[in-house]
Image (cartoon, rainbow, N blue to C red):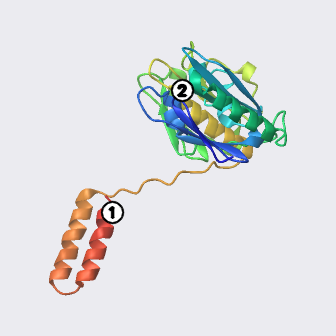
Amino acid sequence: MGDVLAGFHAVWEFESDSVLIRYERGIRTPKLFQALGERRVPLSAVEGVTLTPGRRGTVVLRLLPRPGADPLMEAAAGQLKEGSDPYRLVLPAERETLAEYYADELKGLLTESGSGPAERFLVPAPEAPLQFKAYDAKASFDGTAVQFRWSWTGASSAKWKAGDQSFAVADLGGVEWRSPEVFEGYLRLLGRSADPAAAGQPDQDPAAVVFGLGYGPVHESLPFAAAVLAAVRTRGPVPVAPAASRRDPAEIAERIRHLGELHRAGLVTDEEFSSKKAELLAEL
């Protein structure tokens, strides 16, 4: 197809085998969308398309992901509010005819992509490293292990006695996320043979961190949970985004000063001096 459809908070780019969703940035855009940035959704991960009336003179084009195809939706387990659904594109009502055209085109392509539960995740997981601040701990995930560092102001005595925790992906069997937008939200890591029904209270469980007002927001804790879940399901590390390399400005200034001394002494040519100085400035 190769066409683009722009709606509120997102732009969908249609290809023959996928839909690339680019989320806008702005104060009115849901924070989860901003955190996701963009997502490429293979049509093999989609089982249906709907077009329905929206609120206040809008229509809503929505992809229906297959169960088990998207780690984000699996971790969310139906807890996302409608406005934070990353598979919805809200459009002005006057663009309904255009939206209907794309919906029909997608439906035609989906007949070849399969349906029913997916055997593996088909939509890429959020990239590690990831971290967020819960009420009782700082949680971090580097792609291979999850770390919980307890907060002295929020952690229970049971967690302090257990000490800071580290969980290797290979030792985990799943993730349980309860939205911070409901009462008693939390993120719990499940062992490979753990029974979620037998787990204790999250505030007493060293394998769980609890949320609270301003702690563990959806746009931070849900991508975190999805990344861990994807790593657990594949029994390996998720892709790690390259860390930005930034040097200490004082160190750069000192190296440039030293380079200038070599240049003045005739040990570095004009061309070498200019080239190396540009490289050092680029590291800031």
Q: Position of residue 50 (x, y in %)?
A: 72, 26
Judge the density around disc 1: few (<14), some (14-19), many (≥20) Cα neighbours within 10 Å. Answer: few
SS type, badge 1:
helix
What numbered label is drawn on residue 227? none
Q: Measured along the vertical axis of the image, is residue 222 above or below residue 59?
A: below
Q: Residue furthest bottom?
A: 266
Q: Is residue 81 left or right of residue 242?
A: right
Q: Quadrant of residue 218?
A: top right
Q: Is residue 220 left or right of residue 208?
A: left
> Mark 1: which amino acid?
Ala
Q: Can residue 272 be seen here?
A: yes
**Residue at the spot of label 2:** 218
Residue at the location (62% across, 17% down)?
A: 201
Whether label 2 touches label 1, CB < 8 Å:
no
Residue at the location (43% across, 54% down)?
A: 244
Q: Measured along the vertical axis of the image, is residue 257 above or below residue 53?
A: below
> Mark 2: which amino acid?
Val
Judge the density around disc 2: few (<14), some (14-19), many (≥20) Cα neighbours within 10 Å. Answer: many
